[in-house]
Image (tube, grey):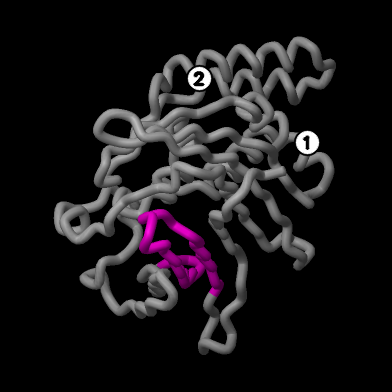
């Protein structure tokens, strides 16, 4: 069960961005990813624990863009996973993600950045399943075998989400979650070649636990890539002053390699 919980944590920190509408695509930014340097992409989630402290999980990617034909190829390698969780939980998390660490994930993005497609997803997952099974066979821990079984049994949609959601969020024209001004009250500020968009989602009507979500996207206008996304979830129990932060996710892109 711990291994399954670790997988759910990973899936939760990488929600799939909605497909952008035609209006959003028409209004999309120019897309020109940097071809001359490596990039580090860090996706971190902080969650409130039962004891009142925050536990963090992070995936750190090494990204390399290349020009191919009428679009771009992105080579994304998960360099490492970081966590300050309880050792038992952190170990289960590693069991789920270790088969992907060091594996190069290849994506094709058209010239306008309107979509992100994984290249040979079936081949990738065969390699991941083989690595998971090899790790399980070399381990005497039953959790390793359970993790390998979970990975092998994942349906295609969940495999794609686990391997691609963070990358689709990175490419702004393909990220339908970023509001374009027609999705309710937002605040937009443009400074020094970066545009910051802030939006707030009110609690759902009738929700057992009213959760309010504030999200801020910072976009690099020169490349059309996400520079940072910060999504904070608050438990609301009354006035704005009574809001309690229960989860925070941060996606951040920086120049240079992860080392």
Q: Is residue 200 left or right of residue 259?
A: left
Q: Is residue 145 above or below residue 215?
A: above
The total of numbered circles placed on residues is 2
Residue linked to disc 1: 91
The N terminus, quarter of image: top right
* Residue 222 lies in the magenta-colored region: yes
Characterize the local packing of mark 1: few (<14), some (14-19) or many (20 or more) Cα atoms within 10 angstroms: some
Q: Main secondary structure of the magenta part?
A: strand
Query: Which structural element holds mark 2?
Result: helix
Decide which of 55, 110 is in the foreground and name it: 110
Query: Which structural element holds mark 1?
Result: helix
Q: Position of residue 217 (x, y in %)?
A: 43, 66
Q: Is residue 232 above or below residue 62?
A: below
Q: Position of residue 136 (x, y in %)?
A: 73, 16
Q: Position of residue 35 (x, y in %)?
A: 44, 42
Image point (60%, 63%), residue name: 247
Image point (65%, 18%), residue name: 132
Query: Could you say which disc has been placed on residue 125 in the image?
Result: 2
Q: Quadrant of residue 141?
A: top right
Q: Is residue 60 left or right of residue 124?
A: right
Q: Quadrant of residue 54?
A: bottom right
Q: Which residues are magenta?
A: 207-235
Q: Is residue 201 visible?
A: no
Q: Position of residue 178 (x, y in %)?
A: 34, 61
Decide which of 253, 100 is in the foreground and name it: 253
Question: Which mark is nearer the camera, 1 or 2?
Answer: 2
| Disc 1/disc 2 C-alpha distance (Å) | 22 Å
Q: Is residue 19 left or right of residue 48?
A: left
* Residue 43 lies in the magenta-colored region: no
The C terminus, quarter of image: top right
Image point (76%, 42%), residue name: 89
Q: Is residue 42 above or below residue 150?
A: below
């Amino acid at each position: 069960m711990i291994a399954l919980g670790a997988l759910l944590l990973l899936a939760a920190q990488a929600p799939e961005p909605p497909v952008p509408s035609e209006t959003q695509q028409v209004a999309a930014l120019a897309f020109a990813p940097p071809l001359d340097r490596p990039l580090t992409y860090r996706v971190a989630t902080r969650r409130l624990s039962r004891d009142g402290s925050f536990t963090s999980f992070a995936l750190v990617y090494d990204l390399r863009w290349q020009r191919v034909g009428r679009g771009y190829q992105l080579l994304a390698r998960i360099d490492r996973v970081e966590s300050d969780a309880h050792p038992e939980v952190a170990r289960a998390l590693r069991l789920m993600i270790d088969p992907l660490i060091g594996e190069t994930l290849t994506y094709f993005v058209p010239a306008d950045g309107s979509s992100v497609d994984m290249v040979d997803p079936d081949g990738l997952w065969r390699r991941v399943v083989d690595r998971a099974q090899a790790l399980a066979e070399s381990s005497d821990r039953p959790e390793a075998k359970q993790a390998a079984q979970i990975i092998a049994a994942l349906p295609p949609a969940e495999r794609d989400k686990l391997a691609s959601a963070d990358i689709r969020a990175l490419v702004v024209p393909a990220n339908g979650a970023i509001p374009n001004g027609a999705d309710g009250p937002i605040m937009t500020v443009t400074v020094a070649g970066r545009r910051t968009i802030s939006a707030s989602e009110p609690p759902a009507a009738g929700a057992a636990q009213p959760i309010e979500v504030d999200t801020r996207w910072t976009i690099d206008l020169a490349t059309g890539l996400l520079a940072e996304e910060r999504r904070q979830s608050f438990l609301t129990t009354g006035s704005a002053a009574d809001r309690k932060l229960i989860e925070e996710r941060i996606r951040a892109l920086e120049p240079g390699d992860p080392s």
